[in-house]
Image (spheres, rainbow, N blue to C red):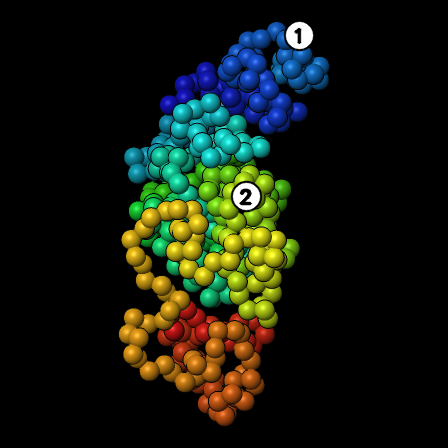
Amino acid sequence: MIDDDELAAWLRLVQTPGVGGEIARRLLSTFGTAQSVFDSTPSARREIAGAAVADTLSSTPEGFDKLLERTRRWLDESAADAPRRIVTLGDAEYSPMLLNTADPPLMLYTMGRLELLARASISIVGSRNPTAQGRDNARQFAAHLSRAGLTVVSGLALGIDGAAHEGGLIGPASTVAVVGTGLDRVYPARHRDLAHQIAQRGLVVTEYSLGMPPLAENFPRRNRIIAGLSRGTLVVEAAIQSGSLITARLAAESGRDVFAIPGSIHSPQSRGCHALIKQGAKLVETAADILSELDVRAAPQVDHREGRADGDAVEDPLLVALGHDPVTLDALSARTGLSAGDLSAKLLELELQGRVARLPGQLFQRRSGA
């Protein structure tokens, strides 16, 4: 556990204007500890960080005392089912995978199972507005991988991230949520219950101090932590202009594997994955493809893409006509010979059964397992 003096020194170092990650790491490398940085002479600091930063380090940042007291209270309010910790760059509990990246955070605020920081993990990211099939894929892949022993890392965003966390919670390896706010906030608010579950059964992590709101610039930066914690990154669905592709690029730059699930050539949500595959990402159709690539041994699992367990069951003719690509009502009518009214009624029935998804633009798609 971090003591009061150590906490004050680290927090002051991180909060001092002009002290970015690179300068802070140079100072720590030279002086050994955060406290030693402030115990050193201004002239010694100037040699490492330059005159401007050295002078800034001589004064306490504005609002520092209030932030320090707030942080101490937050740590003191730690609960048995969701313990709170602060892990610094030099701690033994710091993730070895994250440490081996270009810009590891100086401090990590955590709630939950701290041991998950050191576990073998896979990040799963994708669109905030996925198709129903994409959401299903994220949840199923995450559950399979968590059961196989890979902790699922994602960013608690709406869409694919949320589904990945839900799936990760199903298996014993659980899930890690890397967020772009202080841990005294939940963003998006819709994921408040999910964040609470993760804090109790997984781990919630951020580099941002308490009180930090969800600023737009925070989220691209937190993506480096998602990629850095993981042995590989799986992109489930993503448009060409997508934060998920930033995470994939950061993973590749750190020498980690990048995986992508292909989709329909007609779906905008598949284009980011297809672009990654063209650039060398590994095309995956099942979670077993990822386990094999990462050399992870796992118990046999059901392949949810293959449909119902009863292989001899007769498939619904409308599901056969749907295929696996999004399709319009007119196209289905041409394939089946059914009227628009009859089709609409049947599609509604299948939709209520969770076997068909209605997409924007009056498109319909068969869901996995149907």
Which residue is drawn at the image coordinates 55% and 69% (left, top)? Answer: 264
Kindly identify the amino acid type of the residue bearing the numbered disc 2. Ala
Mark 1 and mark 2: span between their CA atoms? 39 Å
Give the residue at mark 1: 43
Quadrant position of residue 311: bottom left
Against 296, residue 271 (above or below) is below
Q: Nearer the viewer, residue 100 or 327?
A: 100
Please say whether residue 119 is visible from this viewpoint.
yes
Which residue is drawn at the image coordinates 48% and 89% (left, top)? Answer: 336
Secondary structure under the numbered disc 2 in the rendered image: helix
Q: Position of residue 150 (x, y in %)?
A: 38, 46
Against 349, residue 192 (above or below) is above
Q: Which mark is residue 165?
A: none
Give the residue at mark 2: 251
Against 185, residue 58 (above or below) is above
Q: Position of residue 326 (x, y in %)?
A: 53, 74
- Sequence-first tag of 1 and 2: 1
Against 201, residue 362 (above or below) is below
Kindly identify the amino acid type of the residue bearing the numbered disc 1. Ser
Pointer 1: residues within 10 angstroms few (<14), some, or many (20+)?
A: few
